[in-house]
Amino acid sequence: MRLLTHNMLSSNIRGVVNGFPLGIEAEKVVEREVELSAEFLRGVFPKIEWGALVAGARALGHPDLLPGEADASMLASDDFLRRFHRALLQLHVEEGALVCPETGRRFPINKGIPNMLLHEDEV
Amino acid sequence: MGTLLPTCEPSLPQLRPRGRSSWWTEWRRGVPAPARAGAQSPSGVASASASAEGLRKGIAEFYDESSGLWERVWGDHMHHGFYDPHAPASLADHRAAQIRMVEEALSFAALSDDPQKKPKRIVDVGCGIGGSSRYLAKKYGAQCKGITLSPVQAQRAEALAIAEGLADKVSFQVADALEQPFPDGQFDLVWSMESGEHMPDKRKFVGELARVAAPGATIIIVTWCHRDLLPSESSLRPDEINLLNKICTAYYLPAWCSAADYVNIAKSLSLEDIRTADWSENVAPFWPAVIRSALTWRGFTSLLRSGWKTIRGALVMPLMMEGYNKKLIKFAIITCRKPE
């Protein structure tokens, strides 16, 4: 699971008011290189919840990868683009869990696939 | 909604053999009971959560078990092909027909050709092994998230995405279409290709599609339905219900509804530009082709190696043909837009 995906997942457990962002327990993280597309990064930047991305990168063991805040002007910098790209697309949580921010309920990640199925009493 | 019938009774699966030899019953052991329609009120709304859990588990296990076989014989699209009515189709045409189905659905929804307006974030609800996800991601250069109940399918979908160099564009999650794990308004194209038939609560299903759709997004549903009821009817005929029951059991399908029901649900959710069409004639060659493929040596031996659920699914294929021939089963497309 990449942080791009994490940026779009939320906990929909009944009664939870704000299920985003999910916490990340990263047990196994791998990095896979993928070609950088500046066009894509510029296009996706406005849709990214930056705080969640920063927290995600920290949880994956890269606390200094991203600046605490970001704005669109930083997209002109190659260094920023590389960091953004790496955090968003290259880091993968293979094993671990996503954690509901309100209930603490863990959604397991196995072989890179998060399992977001709710139990009967959570619906 | 009078047509959301409890067509899937908790009665014995019609195909259950009686007094057969032990190898048959051996396979049957451990098959979870399909959704018990005793849990459904006459209005058709499934209420008991235990039955919903059982249905989800049944669906997941069915696809965990049968996905591999399907893929070996049919490739990565797990949906009907789209054919010109009455045109003969050779086996080689079917793969192209499955791709044509995707294109026809996009066309029908009148997605804009304007490159500025092409979808950038797509959700594939009931994604199978990701055939549609990968196709749409490639076509539009978009990000696509697929959800499926089957962990085996999610893994396979991911592996295929990596193999096709699409790992940065598509991702797959094990999740329930009735509780999509996304915040509101995330996607500009919401895609459900032949997954609606598995949803026990059609209103909730369409409600979730609408919830995760961004303002102005297009929602495309392609699904099996039963025929629209006549104004004088309050239900399908008993023989029709009987036929659908048998199919439901084998394919882990809860109650069927009609295309008109979907349209009414969309209206009640204030969705706009609602269109629907009956594509039953365009998919007519599909089931005979699937049956023929099962009867080839490779299809047959693969089937024998699969579990009981897959075999039962195969045995029920002629019933699908019967349903189509009787104009009871319809293949429908319903598209609409989330208001801006």
Image (cartoon, rainbow, N blue to C red):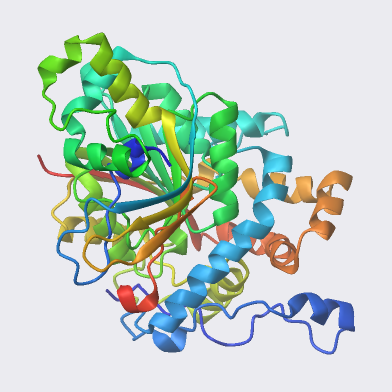
Q: Is residue B290 left or right of residue A112?
A: right
Task: Where is residue B64? Give x, y as percent.
Answer: 63, 58
- Residue depicted at x 38% and y 36%: B144
Asked whether the viewer can see residue B321, the reply is no
Task: Where is residue A89? Give x, y as percent.
Answer: 38, 29
- Residue depicted at x 74% and y 51%: B291
Q: Is residue A41 left or right of residue B33?
A: left
- Residue depicted at x 88% and y 83%: B22
Which of the image's four quarters has the N terminus of chain B?
A: bottom left
Q: Is residue B194 left or right of residue B201?
A: right
Answer with the quarter of the image where residue B317 lies: bottom right
- Residue depicted at x 60% and y 38%: B76
Which of the image's four quarters has the C terminus of chain B?
A: top left
Answer with the quarter of the image where residue B105 lies: top left
Q: Nearer the viewer, residue B230 or A57?
A: A57
Q: Nearer the viewer, residue B116 or B237?
A: B116
Instruction: Give the tally of numbered discs.
Output: 0
Task: Where is residue B51? Give x, y as percent.
Answer: 46, 81
Task: Where is residue B224? Give x, y as percent.
Answer: 47, 56
